Amino acid sequence: MKLPEMKTGLAISALFHAALLLWGLISFAAKPLEAKPNDALPVDIISDKQFSEMTKGVKNAPKDAKPAPLVEKIDPSKPVDDSTAKVTPKKEIDAARNEPQPPPPAPESKPKAADAKPEKKPEPPRVDPIAETLKKEEAKKKAEERAAKAKAEKEQKQAQAYDPTRIAALLDKRDPQRHAAAGDHLSQNPGLGKSQGNAAVLSQSEIDALRRRLAECWNPPVGASNAPNLKVVMRVLFKQDGSVAGQPLLVAGTASPFGPAMAESAKRAILTCQPFKMLRPETYELWKDIEITFDPKDMFGG
Amino acid sequence: MTSDNLHDRSPVDRLPVTCRPLLMTRRAMLAGAAAGAAALWAPRQVRAQTRIDVTQGTVKPMPIALPDFIGGTPNDGEVARNVTQVITANLKRSGLFAPIDQAAYIERITNIDTLPRFPEWRTIAAQALVTGRITRQSDGRLKTEFRLWDVASAEQLTGQQYFTAADNWRRIAHIISDAVYQRLTGEMGYFDSRVVFVDESGPKNQRVKRLAIMDQDGANVRYLTRGDDLVLTPRFSPKTQEITYMSYGGREPRVFLLNIETLQREVVGNFPNMSFAPRFSPDGQRVIMSLQQGSNSNLYVLDLRSKAMTRLTETPAIDTAPSYSPDSARICFESDRGGTQQIYVMGAAGGAAQRISFGEGRYSTPVWSPRGDYIAFTKQGGGSFGIGIMKPDGSGERILTEGFHNEGPTFAPNGRVVMFFRDPGGSAGPSLYTVDISGRNEQKIPTPGFASDPAWSPLLS
């Protein structure tokens, strides 16, 4: 063993190790580990049935027809929204003309039986050269207005002595300003798409439709509610048109006094419900031989 | 390999000829393995068995078709029609069947020994079909045959034949109803049974109370006592045709044993104290009752043969209305040892009692179901009386009916239906009602007058 060389080597090694450790101590301690804040990812837990419902559609399905606006009344002659109609040129009011302006239409100061508010037609704009006339007219109008208001208030007070038998008289007798949306064919949807679309009800796979149909037809025996874990498995062979081939076979069943009644109710459900039209002939291979388990656990609260 | 040298041959060739076919050469084995692998990789129609689960259904009465039974001879038409009507009424009243109106039937059954035309029964949505025939025999007896058909699978489910005396036709109808009920629901029927009750008549302040017995549908009412004495709480023996009841004849109330067939009365015991609510044990050999001493009452068991009395409770409280479990191992009773009337369960030989009722109100008149799965009771609270059921451990409490004033539940022999009496108060009197243990299908049982305190017999057959 050559000690001096070892000593040198040892010294160098120790130095380097110390340097490394020191560096590590300094560099690693300074930075706390921070996790980048992630957006929360919403997670939904769904059952197999829901998954197949959601993924049923076809990517290259043809688009629906053009969106139809709301149409409540058939009147092809009156378009609802004629945005391309030409703006009719308004009559030009020539301020410089000296023609006597027609007197402004007097506000309907004569209140109708229950008309609490006097109706005013919109006045054409005033022009200066006949300001005098104008002012006089305005004064007159104001006086009439006040009179009308006073009368209207009196009328209101009278109307407030509420008479339920005269409700019809209280109703506004004006013609309805709002016209029903008219078009050439009725459409109840005020927006896009058809009123019956596949968007509201997701299409189901055939197996789910079959389950639903069987659930409609199946009447389990009432005593099954008392028997825990009661279920029967039936094997059914189907024909191409959705009807049952032969009789359903009992494959397995829980041993219970209600077993035979349960098996019979299941058999009855299958036979009464046929033909199962929701099963498409194209996928016959998938559904020609099915084992159905009837388990009333969801019905009676487990 | 035709070399003469033995060692040049393959090991297989060296063997004697008889052994050779059993072994394979290495080549053959390799060839076989290759073939097997090829077979494995070959495209095969592998398809898992399609399985679906149906976990939901609808509970609704089963539509059933009951065409009139055929009369074997022209004179039997009327009794055949009557039998059909009784069966139809029974099944409809149970709430589990929906008999289809006869006017809707397409096929007219004229012979029960031929197959019905099932497509026609399917059209009216019948799921089951009952056909039958009644023939009066030369000795005066009635021969009744019936068949129960499953319309969907076009098969006969059951068929029976009965012989009976001509005036027993109602019992045959009830027996057939039970057979149909049992085959289609899986549960034992309850139609061939009777109800004993206290018939009340007269003005409210001077009620005449007589013991009466009738079929469970209200027919065949028979009076068992004359009405001189006040009678209460009749109870059926589970094994014999006997009833116990309490009668206030004379100075003290006594417990009587009455034989229905012979109408012979026997005093069970002449106790110096008041007795309440005697009940039979399931084997019919003992009677359990409560006897009052001073201000409290305790439970006693009386052996009917040896007349030996055994005391069961010794509390300074009022213990009354005991009822045996169907296996005779336990009894349930009503006690106020905890402060208010509650229901307790105790071993049949006495011992520690366990309280099982914990709701708001006072619980009384407990009775154990013949199936052993429920105890029915009367619950009083908040101004109303309810009839309810709970499991023998006290869980699953459910009120079947509520109002003023319901009391005195008794179970049908199959434990599915509870009968009780309701007194609406005022000038009217009490009447009998039945309700299914699911709380549905409350029905009134017709009685000639007012009726109270019903007790349901076991099945007669």
Image (cartoon, coloured by chain):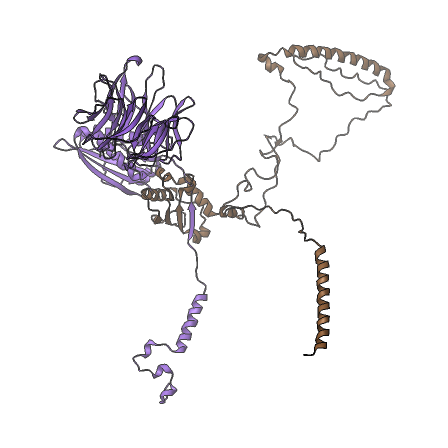
Percent of width and height locating residue A14: 71, 68
Q: What residue appears at the point 43 percent right and 27 percent down from the top-left corner?
A: B360
Q: Is residue B39 above or below residue A249?
A: below
Instruction: Name which quarter of the figure residue A16 lies in.
Output: bottom right
Q: Is residue B89 above or below residue A244?
A: above
Percent of width and height locating residue A286: 44, 53
Quadrant assignment for the C terminus of chain A = top left
Quadrant assignment for the N terminus of chain A = bottom right
Percent of width and height locating residue B253: 24, 20
Q: Is residue A96 above or below residue B110?
A: above
Instruction: Name which quarter of the figure residue B149 lies in.
Output: top left
Count of marks, rendered view? 0
B186 or B307, nearer to the observer: B307
Left or right of B458 on screen, residue A284: right
A79 or B228, nearer to the observer: B228
Left or right of A23 on screen, residue A51: left
Instruction: Name which quarter of the figure residue B378 lies in.
Output: top left
Chain letter, colour brown in render? A
Give the residue furthest to the bottom: B4
Chain letter, colour purple in render? B
Left or right of B296 on screen, residue A171: right
Percent of width and height locating residue A131: 86, 17
Q: Is residue B263 visible?
A: no
Left or right of B295 on screen, residue A279: right
Q: Is residue B89 visible?
A: yes
Q: What residue appears at the point 51 percent right and 48 percent down from the top-left corner?
A: A52
B250 or B295, nearer to the observer: B295
